[in-house]
């Protein structure tokens, strides 16, 4: 990840119409944007389209970026919104089970869950296990998957994830907890591992 000074220098060049800066931005950030898009869309062609639309939207709206977040976080937000709009075009709007868990709706968050990342290293190294995890992550409800991918897999901070998704940090923490619990339920029969207490996990 680049620091803010490098981001600002690159942004200044893009705003000045430097095409080489645009190409540099794409080269630097397209792999991570594509990785995020693929996990959100679950389709390579759709993911490639999301990446293309993300950078087109970013360059067209570059003057609207105030630089408070880093460039990567801003691109993630555009990619997420682009993926969300594509989902809404092909899927009817539905109320997902995970939405009831947002803290502003007053729902109690479950106090016991399974942390998939605590699997023994030899288990995680097995291709079969990795494939099972990927299948489970792809099947997660959209809002849980977005938070899980950004926080757990892309290793964004809670603050950066909240900024990228346009939600509060509390919502990010809640959805991450529910995402992990969802994976526990999905993978319980496969791994047969005991759940961990919430106090043993760090979500900050």
Image (spheres, rainbow, N blue to C red):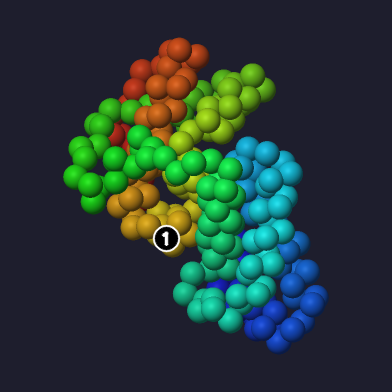
Residue 70 on image: x %, y % = 53, 68
The quarter of the picture where the N terminus appears is bottom right
Residue 57 on image: x %, y % = 64, 68
Residue at numbered disc 1: 166
How many labels sit on residues? 1
Q: Is residue 116 above or below residue 106?
A: above
Q: Is residue 164 above or below residue 97?
A: below
In the displayed structure, does residue 177 sit left or right of residue 105?
A: right
Residue 3 on image: x %, y % = 57, 70
The structure residue drawn at horizontal position 19% and vertical position 45%, both measured from the top left corner, is: 106
Q: Circle 1 sits in a helix, a strand or a loop, which is it? A: loop
In the displayed structure, does residue 33 sit left or right of residue 196?
A: right
Q: Residue furthest bottom?
A: 16
Q: Can residue 171 be spotted in the picture?
A: yes
Is residue 161 or residue 49 the one in the foreground?
49
Residue 88 on image: x %, y % = 53, 48
The structure residue drawn at horizontal position 42% and vertical position 60%, both measured from the top left corner, is: 166
Q: Can residue 76 be spotted in the picture?
A: no
Q: Is residue 32 above or below residue 111?
A: below
Q: Is residue 113 above or below residue 31?
A: above
Q: Residues within 10 Å of mark 1 (few under 14, many from 20)?
A: some
The structure residue drawn at horizontal position 40% and vertical position 22%, both measured from the top left corner, is: 185
The quadrant holding residue 123 is: top right
Is residue 3 or residue 42 the one in the foreground?
42
The structure residue drawn at horizontal position 61% and vertical position 77%, both measured from the top left corner, is: 62
Q: Residue furthest right?
A: 20
In the displayed structure, does residue 5 sit left or right of residue 69?
A: right
């Amino acid at each position: 990840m680049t620091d803010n000074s490098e981001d600002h220098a690159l942004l200044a060049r893009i705003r000045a119409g430097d095409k080489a800066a645009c190409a540099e931005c794409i080269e630097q950030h397209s792999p991570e944007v594509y990785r995020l898009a693929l996990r959100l869309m679950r389709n390579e062609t759709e993911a490639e389209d999301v990446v293309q639309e993300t950078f087109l939207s970013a360059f067209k709206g570059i003057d609207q970026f105030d630089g408070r977040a880093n460039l990567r976080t801003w691109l993630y937000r555009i990619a997420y919104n682009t993926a969300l709009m594509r989902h809404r075009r092909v899927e009817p709007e539905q109320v997902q089970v995970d939405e009831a868990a947002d803290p502003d709706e007053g729902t109690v968050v479950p106090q016991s869950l399974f942390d998939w990342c605590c699997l023994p290293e030899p288990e995680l190294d097995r291709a079969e296990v990795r494939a099972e995890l990927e299948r489970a992550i792809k099947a997660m409800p959209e809002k849980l998957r977005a938070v899980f991918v950004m926080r757990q897999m892309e290793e964004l901070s809670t603050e950066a994830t909240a900024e990228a998704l346009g939600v509060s940090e509390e919502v990010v923490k809640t959805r991450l907890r529910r995402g992990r619990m969802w994976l526990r339920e999905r993978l319980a029969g496969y791994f047969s591992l005991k759940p961990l207490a919430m106090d043993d996990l760090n979500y900050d």
